[in-house]
Image (tube, rainbow, N blue to C red):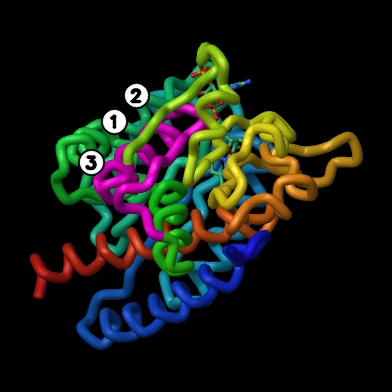
Amino acid sequence: MERGLLIDGKAIAAQIRQELKSETDRLIQNGVQPGLAVILVGRDSASETYVRGKVRACAEVGIHSEQIRMPEETSEDELLDQIRKLNRDSSIHGILVQLPLPEHISPNRVISEIDPDKDVDGFHPINAGRLATGLDSFLPCTPHGILQLLKRTGVQVAGKHAVVVGRSNIVGKPVSLLLQRENATVTMCHSRTEHLQAHTRQADILIAAVGKRHVITKDDVKPGAVVIDVGMNRNEQGKLAGDVDFEEVRPLASHITPVPGGVGPMTIAMLLYNTCLAAEASGDQNL
Ligand code: NDP
């Protein structure tokens, strides 16, 4: 069996962007240019970088994007008003509120205000509920990106044992649901899991979505497993590092994603995908 094959998220995301460029060309010919609004409240430097990346990627595939910057002291009501305005704006098909928000604003309240048909992050309770009950919905971008990485690398998911470490609403929970939908047998682990290693060592597909550098080492991985590292952590030098100790786990794994260049680029690609999907759905109604 081959070992240590790299899953190149950068290349797969570029391929998806190319496919989406043809899709936006087609939509534009039909009179609908997909539009995405990105709202950024405050001045978090990591958020600024993510927003720049999203806006750049939109331009590459022909999606119209609007950046709405609001000061740190913006009230929750002001932000909700802004969202309602975008809900009514027919040139905007997708609305994304960059998280985290300042502490005085409730992310749940804000996400719930987004029109579910424009909820391209897939975080609205209606879309989360649709995913949980097996109905069509916008899929959350990072989990959907992970699934695309597996599919496009030819990794068999059906019948395999997937272990997901992390149970957040934006990564762990929805990726578990998606893997189940693809007929994997899924185990979910979290900070209160006892004997974590006993679980992770059983994984054919191991997804680490914890947010702690090198929480997964070679002792936590079954030889031949596919390892997907969602973590984005900074080391002492400010360099980006994943949840997995890449150097020592790579020789053991059959396939592994690097950080950076693995899951990260896929998250943005799937955001563009959802925006095209939203534009297409609006076109169906308007044309
Ligand atoms: P959260 O902090 O919301 O969730 C972390 C999860 O990990 C929780 O469920 C927590 O358990 C669990 N956990 C914490 N410590 C341990 C431990 N020692 N052992 C087992 N489980 C543990 O994080 P997110 O899901 O939002 O993000 C996870 C990571 O992924 C972060 O590094 C984030 O930056 C990155 N990320 C990357 C993206 C990308 O595009 N590449 C997109 C989104 C996130 P409990 O529930 O019990 O607290």
Is 233 situated left or right of 143 in this image?
right
- Screen quadrant of the N terminus: bottom right
Q: Nearer the viewer, residue 179 or 168?
A: 179
Q: Amino acid at mark 3?
A: Leu
Is 36 situated left or right of 240 in this image?
left
The residue carrying pointer 1 sits among few (fewer than 14), some (14 to 19) or many (20 or more) residues within 10 Å by Cα, namely some
- Screen quadrant of the C terminus: bottom left
Assess whether residue 51 is covered by the magenta stretch.
no
Do labels 1 and 2 touch, CB within 8 Å? Answer: yes
**In the image, residue 251 above or below residue 170:** below
Distance (Cα) linking label 2 and label 3: 20 Å
On the image, numbered disc 1 is attached to which residue? Answer: 112
The residue carrying pointer 2 sits among few (fewer than 14), some (14 to 19) or many (20 or more) residues within 10 Å by Cα, namely few
For the point 47% across and 21% down, the residue is 105
Distance (Cα) linking label 3 and label 1: 16 Å
Identify the image quadrant of residue 78.
top left
For the point 62% across and 65% down, the residue is 2
**Ligand 1 image-quadrant field:** top right
Residue 38 position, x and y percent, is: 47, 50
Q: Which of marks 1 and 3 precedes in the sequence?
A: 1
Disc number placed over residue 131 in the picture, else none = 3
